[in-house]
Amino acid sequence: MHCEAESEFYHPELAPYFTPERRSVLKALGYSTRPSKNNYHLERRVTGIESLCEIAGLYVGTLARVFDMQLDETLRYDAPRVPLPPTGGPETQRFCQPKVS
């Protein structure tokens, strides 16, 4: 699965998020600017439900630790091949149980 975090290169309004400390967080999470050059990306292999849940945790961690996402914010995503937004509910909860750290 391809995971990408936009950078200030294409969106200058994101510059306040890319402090040296937050760039270190991105690196620690496994993001790199190569080969995409300007956005931060990483690739993760999906081998089953457990790895899919780990990727979901990576997304949430990135949003919280780098982009300051709060619990009351709405997540906007771009997934052109996904016909409908996910609905959540019991059908998805059976795959990824909440994890508390």
Image (cartoon, rainbow, N blue to C red):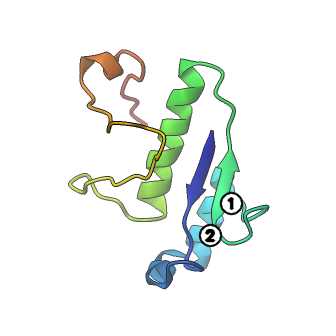
Residue farthest right in this picture:
35
Above-or-below relation of 6 to 75: below
Specify the amino acid type for callout 1: Lys
Quarter of the image for residue 20 reads bottom right
- Residue 12: percent from the left, percent from the top? 50, 84
Residue farthest left in this picture:
72
Provide the secondary structure element on which disc 2 rests. Answer: helix
Residue designated by label 2: 23
Image position of 83 (left or right of 24): left
Which of the labelled discs sits on residue 27, or is there none? 1
9 vs 20, nearest the viewer = 9
55 vs 80, nearest the viewer = 80
- Residue 76: percent from the left, percent from the top? 34, 55
Above-or-below relation of 86 to 37: above
Image position of 74 (left or right of 32): left
- Is the C-beta separation of discs 1 and 2 under 8 Å? yes
Give the class, few, some or many, for how many residues have Cα within 10 Å of label 1's Cα (few <14, many ≥20).
some
Q: Quadrant of the N terminus?
A: top right
Above-or-below relation of 20 to 51: below
The number of discs equals 2
